[in-house]
Every structure is written in C-alpha cells, then in structure tokens.
Image (tube, rainbow, N blue to C red):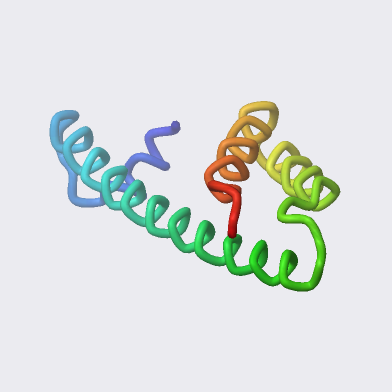
Amino acid sequence: MSAEMISDVTPDAETPDEVIAQGRTRIDELDAQIVALVQERIAVSRGIQQARIAAGGRRVEHGRELQIVDRYAKALGQPGSALALTLLELCRGKRLG
C-alpha cells in the first residue's frame, strides 16, 4: 500500500502508531460489514434454494456456482476462487426440508 493510499484511509494520522490504530479500526469496521453481508447472502441463498426445491428443482445449481467462482477469480485472482468456494459452502448450509 502506498503512503498516499494510507493517508487516504487515515487522513488524521500523524505517527505510524496512529496510522496503525486508525487502519485497524477501519479494518474492524469493514470486517463487521463483510460479516453482515455474508449473513444477508446466506439468507437470500436459502430463499432461492427453497424456491428451487418447491418448483421441483435441485437445491444446488452447479453451473451457477461455477459462474460465481469465475467472477471472484477474475476480480481477485486464485484467492478469489477460494473465497467464492467458502461463501458457497456457507450459503449451501444444511439440506432443506
């Protein structure tokens, strides 16, 4: 991360310790938002799964999952694929009744 990017994230920081403290606070805020978004994604995914099953389909659509993995890989590289697979695993959850 360049010094310019750090100052953009922590405009009020003057010392390295302040930059670190403010950066960590921001990361904690971002992590809370990410967790909330993942929880929302899980809920939306479960609704889709229930609708698909009610319509006589399968709970998981592998073609769609491959599209998601590909999207994350294109945006974030190989670690993006692992992230997508983890999200998909979380969203699959347990088999629905």
Residue at coordinates 21% horizontally, 45% vertically from top-left?
25
Up/down of 70 relative to 57, above or below: above
In the image, residue 72 sits, relative to residue 49, either above or below, namely above
Q: Quadrant of the N terminus?
A: top left
Q: Nearer the viewer, residue 90 or 38?
A: 90
Please tell me in which quadrant of the rendered image residue 66 appears.
top right
Residue 53 drawn at (x, y percent): 73, 65
Q: x, y (%) of residue 75?
A: 69, 43
User: Residue 60: x, y in percent?
Assistant: 74, 51
Quadrant the C terminus occupies = bottom right
Residue positioned most to the front: 97
Left or right of residue 31: residue 17: left
Residue occupying image coordinates x 64% and y 67%: 50
Q: Is 85 on the left or on the right of 52, as rendered?
A: left
Residue at the (43%, 57%) spot, across then down: 39
Which of 42 and 58 lies nearest the eye of the viewer? Answer: 58
> What x and y, as percent, mark residue 37?
45, 59
Task: Answer left or right for 89 relative to 22.
Answer: right
Q: How many marks?
A: 0
